[in-house]
């Protein structure tokens, strides 16, 4: 069996990694952005919304790769277990199968970690968006009150 992840469709893991670098950089820039006027708040809110949609699409593709890696790991481990199970006891056969499937386990773990990191980034963007909505609401309220008093 090969040490690479079998893919049936969609982008490769390396293509997803390149996509993530761009998404991550944009997300970090937006999270650290501090708008100073209502127009900037609206623009940043729109950029955050667009990026959250792109990250959701990325998570969907990454999840597909994650499940593919899990199936690959399971196939490799079960194949090794059937080979080693003929010659050794269950405990030793399982341990040997686990060792044989380590490269697939590492790929699967890596994809899981990438998924959770992207998910946490999306949560940070959502928090930023909620904060911007509150700021926008407060600015509109102040502008409305100022207009009523004059």
Image (cartoon, rainbow, N blue to C red):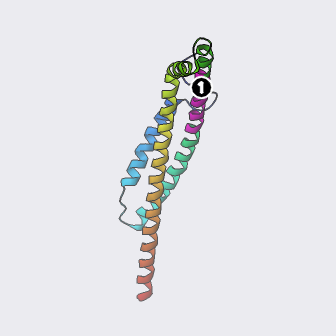
Residue ID at (43%, 38%): 21
Q: As displayed, is residue 7 above or below residue 127?
A: above
- Locate residue 90, reporting x and y percent: 58, 20
Q: Residue at x 62, y 23 (%)?
A: 75
Q: Residue furthest bottom?
A: 150
The residue beneath circle 1 is 72
Which quarter of the image is occupied by the C terminus? bottom left
Residue neighbourhood size for the residue with mark 1, other residues' Cα within 10 Å, grouped as few (<14), some (14–19), many (≥20): many
Q: In the image, which residues are magenta? A: 62-77
Quadrant containing the N terminus in the rendered view:
top right
In percent of width and height, residue 83 lies at: 61, 14
Residue 63 located within the stretch drawn in magenta: yes
Q: Between 119 and 33, which is closer to the camera in this rendering?
A: 119
* Relative to 58, residue 84 above or below: above
Q: Left of 60 or right of it: where is 36? A: left
The image position of residue 121, as x and y in percent, is 45, 48
Res 144 → quadrant: bottom left
* Residue occupying image coordinates x 43% and y 48%: 27
Could you say whether the residue bearing mark 1 is in a helix, strand or loop?
A: helix
Quarter holding residue 94: top right
26 sits left or right of 82 in the view: left
- State the predominant SS element of the stretch in magenta: helix
């Amino acid at each position: 069996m090969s040490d690479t992840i079998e893919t049936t469709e969609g982008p490769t893991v390396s293509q997803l990694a390149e996509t993530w670098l761009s998404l991550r950089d944009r997300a970090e820039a937006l999270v650290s952005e501090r708008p100073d006027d209502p127009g900037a708040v609206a623009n940043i809110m729109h950029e955050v919304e667009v990026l959250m949609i792109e990250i959701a699409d990325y998570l969907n593709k990454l999840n597909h790769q994650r499940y593919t890696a899990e199936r690959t790991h399971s196939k490799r481990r079960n194949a090794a277990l059937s080979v080693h199970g003929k010659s050794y006891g269950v405990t030793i056969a399982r341990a040997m199968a686990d060792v044989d499937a380590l490269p697939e386990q590492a790929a699967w773990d890596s994809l899981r970690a990438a998924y959770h990191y992207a998910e946490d980034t999306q949560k940070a963007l959502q928090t930023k968006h909620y904060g911007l909505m509150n700021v926008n609401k407060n600015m509109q309220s102040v502008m409305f009150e100022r207009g009523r008093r004059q």
